[in-house]
Image: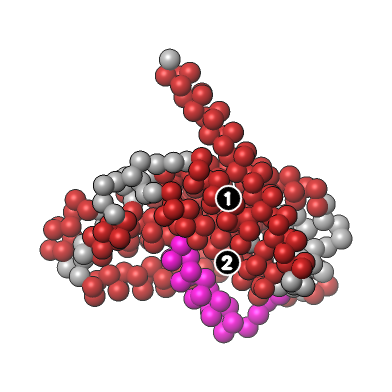
């Protein structure tokens, strides 16, 4: 009986993921129309890219990202409106805006204004679909009260240091992992004869961009830590899984025109990035309510 129920749950969950992915494709079409009306420059993909393949990849990856986000945000136990807002912020920043920032700096394929505007529409519809299909029970406490309670668990100065640490660790991990794969990837960026649309900006630009990305990345996950209602290991597993899937599926799988060697190197880099970032976020930002007194005494 349990096996039947489990199989039924998996089937229903995948079906919900399919529906959300289809909704996301509708949003992407709307985003394309709006950016065209606004006269924003589109994505400058190489002629050899198979758009049908990109479409199918978008559909299949959309299924599983919907399932991962839906199941994780369900654990926050918040109402529909709050869930919709937080999912939209999380999805838009991680799957569109932050990718658009990086693409506009490291390639000549996408304009930032296009990526920023285009991503709003699929993100809105996907957030709406996930919020509808993955409802969750609500806690008795109002959401603002839960935010207030979280920030009372440690002294203000300690929180500030933890948030600064969580912000800056992004760029530390970025450079650390970049150093590991740089012998493989840098030559592709430095040789214009490759015609891959890749650009290697000055270090000062890279630092500024990664500081901005690190700050926005932190903002996107902060509500999850504040409202989390499960264990520490569970949070790490969910967060690292979503980070890995978003970075690999939404990043490397779509850059089909890049050499396999470059994509594999970046995929390894992004996987390690995701695991380390999730680990440090959990260490710095996870403060369970039942350990308030203990954590304050530790300060």
Which segment is the magenta one?
Answer: 198-220
Q: Residue furthest right?
A: 47
- Overall secondary structure of the magenta section: helix
Q: Position of residue 9 (x, y in %)?
A: 49, 28
The residue nearer to you, when weighing 144 against 201, is 144
Q: Is residue 193 magenta?
A: no
**Quadrant in the rendering for residue 263:** bottom right
**Residue at numbered disc 1:** 126
Secondary-structure class at tag 2 = helix
Q: Secondary structure at mark 1?
A: helix
**Residue denoted by label 2:** 98
The quadrant of the image that shows the C terminus is bottom left
Residue positioned 40% across, 41% down in the render: 136
Name the residue nearer the viewer: 280 or 47.
47
Image location (x, y in percent) of residue 146: 28, 57
Closer to us: mark 1 or mark 2?
Answer: 1
Q: Is residue 106 left or right of residue 212?
A: right
* Image location of residue 221, percent across then percent down: 43, 60
Vertical relation: 78 (above or below) 262: above
């Amino acid at each position: 009986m349990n096996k039947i129920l489990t199989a039924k749950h998996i089937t229903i969950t995948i079906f919900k993921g399919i529906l959300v992915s289809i909704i996301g494709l509708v949003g992407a079409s709307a985003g394309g129309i709006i950016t065209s009306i606004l006269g924003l420059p589109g994505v400058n993909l190489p002629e050899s890219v198979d758009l049908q393949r990109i479409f199918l990849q978008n559909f299949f990856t959309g299924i599983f990202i919907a399932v991962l986000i839906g199941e994780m945000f369900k654990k926050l136990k918040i109402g529909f409106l709050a869930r919709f807002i937080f999912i939209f912020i999380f999805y838009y920043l991680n799957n569109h805006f932050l990718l658009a920032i990086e693409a506009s700096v490291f390639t000549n394929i996408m304009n930032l204004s296009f990526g920023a505007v285009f991503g709003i529409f699929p993100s809105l519809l996907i957030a709406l679909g996930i919020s509808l299909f993955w409802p969750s029970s609500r806690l008795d406490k109002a959401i603002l009260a839960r935010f207030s309670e979280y920030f009372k668990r440690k002294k203000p100065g300690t929180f500030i240091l933890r948030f600064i640490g969580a912000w800056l660790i992004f760029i530390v991990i970025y450079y650390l992992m970049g150093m590991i794969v740089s012998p493989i990837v840098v030559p592709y960026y430095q040789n214009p004869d490759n015609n891959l649309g890749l650009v290697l900006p000055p270090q000062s630009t890279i630092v500024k961009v990664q500081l901005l990305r690190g700050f926005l990345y932190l903002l996107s996950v902060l509500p999850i830590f504040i409202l989390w209602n499960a264990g520490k290991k569970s949070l790490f597993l969910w967060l690292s899984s979503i980070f890995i899937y978003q970075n690999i599926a939404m990043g490397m799988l779509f850059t089909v025109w890049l050499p396999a060697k470059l994509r594999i190197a970046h995929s390894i880099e992004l996987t390690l990035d995701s695991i380390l970032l999730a680990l440090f976020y959990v260490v710095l930002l996870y403060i369970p309510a039942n350990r308030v007194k203990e954590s304050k005494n530790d300060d």
